[in-house]
């Protein structure tokens, strides 16, 4: 049996493949910048192992946010070796999962727009160029954390139209003082900010929200995409919940930058199954 993991900062989709059949099990996210080997071991024990026959797993492909360097990959590898000592394990960055799911074995441009942002040029097997997104503190333009942060700024600075402000307070029962206190005290501020992106999703027909989200996607192009040489020669292929929910606005902004549209999908599951099976 083959086990494929697509792990972001918020959640992990485990895909168990047995010949032509597969099942998906969901656990928390395993970004090694935010979680330890022991915490991963515990999560796998209680969230994954009960749903699989781990002795039958012969190969694991783990694609994870934060898994770009050997020290961070080792955090994941040690946890997987604990539970699957006989399995062959490959650990790669989640950006490679996005590229393989979106493009298969074709060359092109691929991006992630989820809790965070990432982009690359792909040669059909591996990533050949990656413009750094700088993370949620300095960058991650176009991500859920970015959109959520702009929602929070608009609310705290009293820039929201009254009807949106009232809906925000009804949904979240917070005020600017509570938000500022929480954002500087929570363990994972990126997830905290991204959680407010759902508010934009529920109100995406409102002109104020449309302008806010489009500005975030414009920042995504101006600060990241446009720095790829000859970016207009590629199609825009994007994976992630933010890209999927705000697809129409993303397409509009891409067209403003003269970039043709490829695939915009929510999850890499189907693409990864096709790539590895």
Image (tube, rainbow, N blue to C red):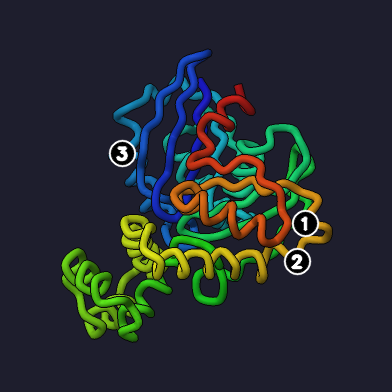
- In the image, taking residue 135 as reference, residue 195 lies left or right, namely left
Cα gap from disc 1 to disc 2, whole angstroms: 8 Å
**Would you name the residue on which mark 3 appears?**
47
- In the image, taking residue 260 as reference, residue 230 lies left or right, namely right
Secondary structure of the residue carrying numbered label 1: helix
Q: Residue 168, which numbered label?
A: none
Query: Where on the picture, by quarter, is residue 202?
Result: bottom left
Regarding residue 60, the answer to whether it shows in the image is: yes
Closer to us: 127 or 47: 127
- Closer to the observer: label 1 or label 3? 1
Task: Identify the mark nearer the N-term, 2 or 3.
Answer: 3
Query: Where on the picture, by quarter, is residue 188?
Result: bottom left
Q: Residue 231, which numbered label?
A: 1
Q: Are marks 1 and 2 in contact (CB under 8 Å)?
A: yes
At which x and y percent is residue 261? 66, 46
Q: Are marks 2 and 3 in contact (CB under 8 Å)?
A: no
Residue occupying the point 35% across, 42% down: 27
Closer to us: 267 or 67: 267
Closer to us: 79 or 206: 206
Q: Quadrant of the C terminus?
A: top right
Secondary structure of the residue carrying numbered label 3: helix
Cα gap from disc 2 to disc 3, whole angstroms: 40 Å
Cα gap from disc 1 to disc 3, whole angstroms: 41 Å
Query: Where on the picture, by quarter, is residue 12?
Result: top left
Residue occupying the point 43% across, 53% down: 37
Regarding residue 75, the answer to whether it shows in the image is: no
Rendered view: 1 above or below 258:
above
**Would you name the residue on which mark 2 appears?**
227
Residue occupying the point 44% across, 35% down: 14
Closer to us: 60 or 18: 18
**Residue closest to the far top:** 19
Task: Identify the mark nearer the N-term, 1 or 3.
Answer: 3
């Amino acid at each position: 049996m083959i086990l494929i993991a697509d792990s972001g900062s918020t959640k992990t989709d485990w895909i168990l493949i047995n010949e032509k059949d597969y099942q998906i099990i969901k656990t928390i996210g395993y970004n090694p910048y935010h979680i330890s080997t022991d915490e991963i071991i515990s999560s796998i024990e209680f969230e994954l192992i009960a749903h699989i026959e781990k002795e039958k797993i012969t190969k694991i492909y783990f694609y994870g946010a934060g898994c770009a360097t050997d020290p961070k990959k080792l955090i994941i590898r040690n946890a997987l070796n604990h539970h699957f000592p006989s399995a062959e394990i490959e650990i790669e960055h989640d950006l490679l999962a996005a590229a393989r799911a979106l493009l298969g074995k074709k060359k092109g441009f691929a991006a992630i727009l989820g809790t965070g942002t990432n982009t690359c040029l792909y040669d059909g097997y591996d990533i050949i160029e990656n413009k750094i997104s700088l993370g949620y503190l300095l960058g991650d333009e176009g991500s859920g954390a970015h959109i959520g942060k702009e929602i929070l700024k608009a609310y705290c600075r009293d820039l929201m139209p009254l009807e949106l402000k009232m809906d925000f307070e009804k949904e979240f029962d917070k005020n600017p003082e509570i938000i500022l206190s929480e954002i500087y005290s929570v363990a994972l501020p990126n997830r905290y900010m991204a959680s407010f992106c759902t508010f934009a999703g529920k109100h995406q027909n409102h002109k104020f929200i449309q302008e806010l989200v489009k500005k975030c996607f414009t920042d995504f192009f101006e600060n990241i995409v446009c720095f790829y040489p000859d970016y207009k020669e590629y199609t825009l292929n994007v994976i992630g919940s933010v890209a999927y929910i705000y697809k129409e606005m993303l397409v509009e902004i891409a067209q403003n930058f003269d970039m043709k549209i490829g695939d915009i999908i929510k999850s890499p599951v189907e693409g990864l199954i096709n790539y590895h099976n």
